[in-house]
Amino acid sequence: MVAPEPEPEPEPIPLPSYSLELRFGVTFPADYSFDQALAALRYDGLRAAATAVVGVQIPVLDWLWLGGRFGGRGRSWAHPDRDAASLVAGELLATVQVRAWLGRVVELGLMVSGGLGWMQVAMRDATSDQAVGRFGVEAILAFKTGEHFAFGPRVGYDFFEWSGMNAYGHGVDVGGFSLGLALEGRE
């Protein structure tokens, strides 16, 4: 009797030399004192900030990726009789990601980011801006689609606030709980 041949080991998943990421999403900032002051002046704002991010990551180990991101986000507050008040923000971040494969298609991960943010508030022909610290954590779920692409949802929390932004000590936020969808190109 001939013994059956053992099944061959599956080929390892090839590690990309780099990954480019494009992410769109929304954050849900906290209700800060600036929001409350604007509401008292009849401004009405949606407590959400649209976000767009571009990033690059380089895997240094199978499970550890280092990289950076830059992006922008914004909010506005409408007024029935005046121009809207607005807030735009930019960010430049360093990232550390831990990733693991579940099979050959699904990838799970966690990303921690930190760096510098910039915010500008415009209201009634006046602007004010400030550089602020920016930190975040994000869960990653990616689905590999072919050899060079992956996509998936992102869920996280961003710390992106400006305390004491005016003489009244008001604070404003464009961080908070975040949801997004990312597309990755890998080479």
Image (cartoon, helix red, strand yellow):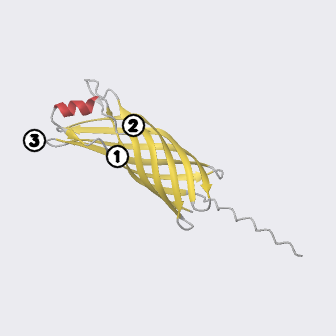
For badge 2, the amino acid type reads: Phe
* Label 1 CA crowd tier, 10 Å (few <14, some 14–19, many 20+): many
Mark 1 or mark 2, which has the lower sequence index? Answer: 1
Q: Tell me: 152 left or right of 173.
A: right
Residue 81 is marked as 3
**3D distance between C-alphas at marks 1 and 2:** 11 Å
Residue of label 2: 160
- Element under disc 1: strand
Of the pair 42 and 59, the residue shown nearer to us = 42
Query: Label 2, label 3: how many angstroms apart (C-alpha)?
Result: 30 Å
Disc 3 to disc 1, C-alpha distance:
25 Å
Q: Tag 2: Cα neighbours inside 10 Å, few (<14), some, or many (≥20)?
A: many
Viewer-proximal residue among 52 and 28: 28
Q: Which mark is residue 10?
A: none
Secondary structure of the residue carrying numbered label 2: loop
- The amino acid type found where label 3 is placed reads Asp
Query: On the rendered structure, is 18 left or right of 44?
Result: right
In the rendered picture of this protein, how many numbered marks are placed on residues? 3
Outermost residue to the bottom: 1
Badge 3: residue crowd in 10 Å (few <14, some 14–19, many ≥20): few
Residue at horizontal 59%, vertical 50%? 99
Would you place residue 23 above or below residue 110 in this image?
Answer: below
Instruction: Give the residue drawn at x 57%, y 67%.
Output: 147
Asked if the residues shown at circle 1 and circle 2 are in contact, with their CB atoms under 8 angstroms apart, the answer is yes
Q: Which residue is mark 1?
A: 73
Q: Earlier in the sequence, mark 2 or mark 3?
A: 3
Q: Is residue 72 above or below residue 16?
A: above
Q: Relative to 176, is 146 on the left or the right? A: right
Q: Quadrant of residue 177?
A: top left
Residue 71 is situated, as x and y percent measured from the top left of the image, at 40, 48
Image coords of residue 19 (percent x, y): 54, 57
